[in-house]
Each structure stands twice: as C-alpha cells, then as structure tokens.
Amino acid sequence: MTTITDIRTIGIAVADQDQALKFYRDTLGFEVRLDGMAGDMRWLEVAPPGAMVSLALTTGETTSNRETGIRFVVPDATTEHAALRTGGVSVGELLAWPGVPPMFTFDDPDRNQFVVVEQAEEDSR
C-alpha cells in the first residue's frame, strides 16, 4: 500500500518551451503555475485556470502525432471546437455518438495530441 494521494503534474515534451508557453498561455488561456530554473534546466508548468493537475512543458525529443492520453473537460464541446478552430488550432472532427459525450482532438504546435470531452452532467464535481 502506498501513500500516493493525487496526480499533480503530467509532463509533455516540447521542442521550444517559449513557443509552447505562448500556445498554452496565449491561445488556450492556461495559467503559468511555475516557471523556474533548476540548474541549467527550466521547469515550466501550465494549467487551465482552477485545474488541479498541471502540464509540465519539458524539453525533449518530439515526434509527430503523439497521443498524450490527456483528456480536457469543457462544458460545451461544440462551442469549444469552433473557438479553437477559429483561433487557428489544429482540431479533429467533432465526434458525437449516442450515450457518449461529444469529443474531439486537437494538436499543439509540437504535435502532442489531446482529447477534449464535454462534461456529462452526472460527472459534475
């Protein structure tokens, strides 16, 4: 049995932290949670306002079309899909199946792929 109680940060590899920061902060509206140096390594965390879990934008090898496994929640997937597309974000098709919340994918500039899912009413916290 462990004493692990939560998930704080999920790391994703980016080629350029400044460019990634511009996308997450200026395009997606994420807040900067931490931006500091540890020796010669920059530690940069961003998150949607009010979110408990942040993303660490780490420098590392980037590959194309990398599915991160990360799901973001929005109140209205159709509205968010249109807003991101209008903002120049590479978004996938809006998917809607009976009994499943609407969802779509989007890519960051490093081709990290995320899924946006409409929050079901029974999932409200």
Image: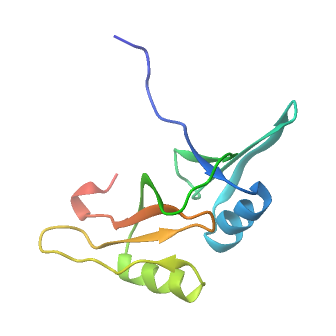
Q: Which residue is drawn at 36% across and 82% down?
A: 78
Q: State the image quarter where residue 36 is shown.
A: top right
Q: Which residue is farthest right?
A: 40
Could you tell whether 123 is left or right of 19 in the image? left
Q: Quadrant of the N terminus?
A: top left
Question: Which of these two is toward me, 122 or 102?
Answer: 102
Which one is in front, 93 or 32?
93
Residue 37 in the image: above or below residue 49? above
Q: Which of 42 and 51 is in front in this view?
A: 42
Residue at image x 43%, y 15%?
Answer: 3
On the image, the x and y values in percent for residue 16 come to: 76, 57
Residue ranking furthest to the left: 98
Indicate left or right for 42 with 54 as reference. right
Total number of numbered labels? 0
Left or right, 118 with respect to 29, comes to left
Q: Residue 95's quadrant in the figure?
A: bottom left
Tell me how the rendering is colored: rainbow
Where does residue 64 sit, x and y in percent of width and height?
Answer: 54, 62
Compared with 14, 28 (above or below) is below
State the residue at coordinates (65%, 73%): 27
Residue at 60 percent across and 84 percent down: it is 87
Q: Where is residue 49 in the image (x, y as percent from the top left)?
A: 59, 58
Residue 100 coordinates in the image, percent (x, y): 18, 67
